[in-house]
C-alpha cells in the first residue's frame, strides 16, 4: 500500500488492552525464552536491540529484514554457543553471581 495510505490507516487505528490480556501475557511469558509464547507476544514490538535500526530506517522505504525481525521474532532467535551456554547455566550462575556481588558491597 502506498506510504500515505499506510499512515492514514495507522492514525485511525486504536489499540486497547484489557487487564485480563495483560495478566495473560504475563502468565504466558514468565518462563521467558524457554516457554513457547514469549515470541508470539513479542511480535510487532520494537525491542531495545532494534530501536537504533528503526530510528535510522526510512519510514517510506523500511528495511524488509528489520520488518521481518520485528514482526516474526520466532524466526530470528539468537542461537549462538554463548547464548546456549548462558541458558543452560543460568540457574547455577545466578546464586554464584549474587555471592560474588555480596563481596563487593
Image (tube, helix red, strand yellow):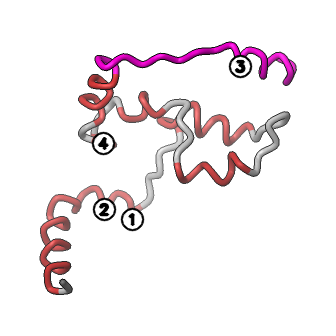
Mark 1 surroundings within 10 Å by alpha-carbon count, few (fewer than 14), some (14 through 19), many (20 or more): few
Label pair 2/1, CB-CB below 8 angstroms: yes
Which numbered disc flags the more N-terminal residue, 1 or 3? 3
Residue 86 horizontal/vertical position (percent): 30, 62
Q: Nearer the viewer, residue 102 or 32?
A: 102
Residue 25, compared with residue 59, is above or below; it is above
Which numbered disc flags the more N-terminal residue, 3 or 2? 3
Which numbered disc flags the more N-terminal residue, 3 or 4? 3
Q: Secondary structure at mark 3?
A: helix
Q: Is residue 15 magenta?
A: yes
Residue 83, compared with residue 101, is above or below; it is above
Q: Which residue is mark 2?
A: 86
Q: Nearer the viewer, residue 15 or 62?
A: 15
Identified at 18% across, 65% down, the residue is: 94
Q: Which residue is mark 1?
A: 82
- The alpha-carbon separation of the residues under discs 2 and 4 comes to 13 Å
Q: Residues in magenta?
A: 1-21
Q: Nearer the viewer, residue 79 or 30?
A: 30
Residue 32: assigned label: 4
Label pair 3/4, CB-CB below 8 angstroms: no
- In the image: residue 89, left or right of residue 10: left
Label pair 2/4, CB-CB below 8 angstroms: no
User: In which quarter of the view is residue 87 placed?
Assistant: bottom left
- Give the position of the N terminus as an image quadrant: top right
Mark 2 surroundings within 10 Å by alpha-carbon count, few (fewer than 14), some (14 through 19), many (20 or more): few
Q: Is residue 14 magenta?
A: yes
Identified at 23% across, 60% down, the residue is: 90
- The alpha-carbon separation of the residues under discs 1 and 4 comes to 17 Å
- The alpha-carbon separation of the residues under discs 1 and 3 comes to 42 Å
Q: Which residue is mark 3?
A: 11
Amino acid at each position: 500500500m502506498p506510504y500515505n495510505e499506510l499512515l492514514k490507516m495507522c492514525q485511525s487505528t486504536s489499540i486497547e488492552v484489557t487487564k485480563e490480556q495483560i495478566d495473560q501475557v504475563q502468565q504466558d511469558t514468565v518462563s521467558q525464552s524457554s516457554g513457547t509464547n514469549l515470541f508470539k507476544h513479542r511480535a510487532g514490538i520494537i525491542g531495545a536491540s532494534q530501536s537504533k535500526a528503526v530510528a535510522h530506517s526510512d519510514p517510506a522505504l523500511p528495511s524488509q529484514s528489520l520488518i521481518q525481525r520485528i514482526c516474526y521474532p520466532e524466526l530470528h532467535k539468537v542461537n549462538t554457543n554463548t547464548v546456549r551456554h548462558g541458558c543452560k547455566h543460568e540457574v547455577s550462575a545466578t546464586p554464584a553471581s549474587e555471592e560474588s556481588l555480596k563481596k563487593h558491597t
